[in-house]
Amino acid sequence: SPFFSIIIAQKKKAARREEKKEEEIDVLFLLRLYEKRMNLKKHRYLVCDLDEVVKDDLTASSLLNLVKERVVAEGGEIGLGRMDPLVRFFDNLTQLAIFQVNRISTPLFRKATMFPVLRISGSMRTCRPHAIRILRKRFLTCNDGDKEQKYQERLEALQRAIH
């Protein structure tokens, strides 16, 4: 009878929808598993100027803790977990820092920390020349003889640290 054929057709449609949902879930699961296995996290390297943040006793670990506190306040613990920030280079004298964050969380980092970002790069290799250029500019504008020696030492330290 036509009434039963309509009900059977509806049940078949519902069964097909359920199969599609299961297939979508399986695909998402496989993509996440593939990302974990292949370690496909993409990073961005941000060269930041820390003029207003720098204190005499600030270290790389205390700077990282400061960044984490600000990110948790802005994006919560999930935002911090997605960002996975690292300090790749920090120098208190030159007021320059290079942070490594996950690519997808770069806008959250900029919004939460409010550091002036001088350069965003996709790899440390492309970030290095810009950081060296900034240090050289600061070295050339420095008039203090004692400070010039310190800048020169910092420039050499940067070249060793991010080489």
Image (cartoon, helix red, strand yellow):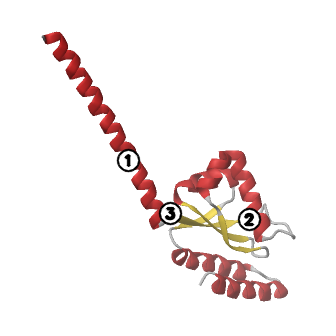
Separation of marks 3 and 2 at Cα, in angstroms: 27 Å
Instruction: Pinpoint residue 72: horizontal percent, then vertical percent.
Output: 70, 49
Near mark 3 (Cα within 10 A), the count class, few <14, some 14-19 or many ≥20, is few
Element type at marker 2?
Answer: loop
Give x and y (percent) for residue 126: 51, 75
- Element type where label 3 sits in the image: loop
> Residue, x 61% and y 79% (percent of image)?
133
Q: Residue at x 72, y 46 (%)?
A: 73
| The one of 2 and 153 positioned closer to us in this rendering | 2
Please say if 107 is above or below 50. Answer: above
Q: Circle 1 is placed at which residue position?
A: 26
Distance from the alpha carbon under mark 3 to that under mark 1: 21 Å
Badge 3 or badge 1: first in the primary sequence = 1
The residue beneath circle 2 is 50
Which residue is nearer to you in this view: 1 or 101? 1
Position of 97 relative to 161 (above/below): above
Q: Residue furthest right?
A: 57
Q: Report whether 112 appears left or right of 105.
A: right
Amino acid at circle 1:
Asp
Residue 105, percent from left and from top: 57, 54
Which sits in the foreground, 41 or 55?
41
Disc 3 + disc 1, Cβ < 8 Å: no
Residue ID at (49%, 66%)? 39
Pointer 3 residue? 41
Identify the amino acid type marked 2.
Answer: Leu
